[in-house]
Image (cartoon, rainbow, N blue to C red):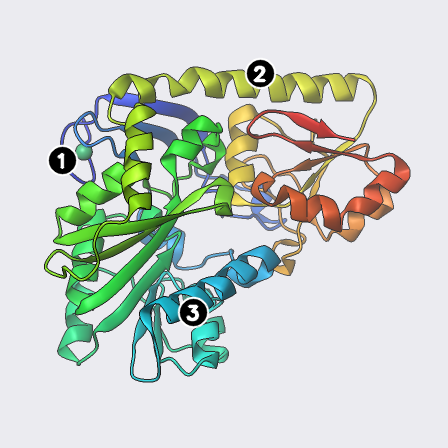
Amino acid sequence: MANCLFCAAPLRHTFVDLGMSPLCESFLTADQVNQMEPFYPLHAQVCERCFLVQVQEYVRPEAIFTEYAYFSSYSDSWLAHARSYVEMISGRLGLGPSSKVVELGSNDGYLLQFFVTKGIPVLGIDPAKNVAEKAIARGVPTLTTLFGQATAGELVAAGTQADLICGANVLAQVPDVNDFVAGIRLLLKPGGVVTVEFPHLMRLMAENQFDTIYHEHFSYFSFLTAERIFAAHGLTLFDVDELPTHGGSLRIYARHVEDRSRPLTERARKLRDRELAAGLERLETYTAFTEQVHETKRRLLEFLIGARRRGKRVAGYGAPGKGNTLLNYCGIRTDFLEYTVDRNPYKHGRFLPGTHIPIFAPERLAETRPDYVLILPWNLKDEIMEQLAYIRGWGGQFVVPIPDVKVYA
Ligand SMILES: [Zn+2]
């Protein structure tokens, strides 16, 4: 039996079992489509002691993160989110030319570039070589390594400590969460602040976002569980923002336990109460999630079967990781979804892992005029429906699968 990533209690309870699935970012070339493809269990479990929801490490992290297809800069709304964060946090902490900002999981430098523009010294850390090269090319110094106590120790020995350590959508992807948070504590100056963003488990459950479970995401956090993990490493959560990104995320603010200058905010206290009221410290709340997921699968398949019986054509929009979880779990291949389109040229001419649905440039939609466009990155649905408003010209309609199957005429 496996043990909890954080507290080492035996893992005995299923949160949801999504069956066998390939790695959601392993887009295939035309040659690879005819070869064997590795599938791994996508089984999320919940720890009965600390309530961390987790997917075991079935695949070595090196296999996942050394070449990463996701370039943060391809999403306009994500860039806008990064820019407004930089404005907010530089003001709030009074960052300037003598400060140091370190971002963990810095991707292609999409965020740190805005600090650079303001003259604030930065360092990015990211294990994926191909995205880190992009960052360096745009003037963002970047270390290509998995962050943890070893890296933090080397940086501190070389005289680097941070006033701000930030990370968005990196905590979930860390294979050893204890080593990672312990590394943050080492690297943080005595009066420094940490901000970390992650999808909020309470929203994942309330809004049925089971497709945000991937092999690449080992952990799924509530505020309460994050608080417990940071506290175990001498860091106190003192504030939180609730964000609309990725279907509902938290941005937690942490400081050293010894730093009394930043008291717990009312917002943080209230969120804690809401999580308690939502049952996030009771095992039954988690074990009830599976039935909700089964129902969504039945409803999406019902819609697609009905549409195909009526002779309607369905194409996809986007090729995000979450789309691959959804399509593989539901068994949707080109029999239901002819193709999908994506703005990222890296993906054009490739195929979705597992389902082998081909990926084209967005122009394909206007050429083939499908009756329905299934929006796979449903968290960006407003932005996408605006961009693709032209499909209405031929009577095309949008379908959003999560939280519930919904057609937008
Ligand atoms: Zn645990």
Q: Which comes before the other along the chain, label 2 or label 1? A: 1
Disc sitting over residue 336 in the figure: none
Disc sitting over residue 298 in the figure: 2
Is 178 above or below relative to 205? below
Quadrant hosting residue 267: top left
**Which residue is rendered at x = 50% and y = 40% of the image?**
247
Q: Which comes before the other along the chain, label 3 or label 2? A: 3
Going by the image, does 322 lie left or right of 251? right
Going by the image, does 324 lie left or right of 262? right
Helix, strand or loop at label 3? It is: helix
Q: Position of residue 118 (x, y in %)?
A: 45, 80
CB-based contact (under 8 Å), mark 3 and mark 2:
no
Q: Residue furthest left?
A: 258
- Which residue is denoted by mark 3 in the rendering? 132
> 10 Å neighbourhood of mark 3: few (<14), some, or many (≥20)?
many
Q: Position of residue 38 (x, y in %)?
A: 44, 38
Give the camera-side residue of 387 and 134. 387
**Which residue is rendered at x = 32% and y = 22% of the image?**
286
Which quadrant of the picture is home to ligand 1? top left
Amino acid type at circle 1 is: Ala
Mark 2 sits near ligand 1, with its Cβ under 8 Å away: no
Quadrant hosting residue 50: top left
Disc sitting over residue 8 in the figure: 1
CB-based contact (under 8 Å), mark 2 and mark 1:
no
The CA span between labels 2 and 1 is 35 Å
Q: Position of residue 230 (x, y in %)?
A: 19, 49
Q: Quadrant of the N terminus?
A: top left
Q: Residue furthest right?
A: 394
Quadrant hosting residue 183: bottom left
Going by the image, does 40 lie left or right of 12? right
Is 301 above or below relative to 204? above
Mark 1 sits near ligand 1, with its Cβ under 8 Å away: yes
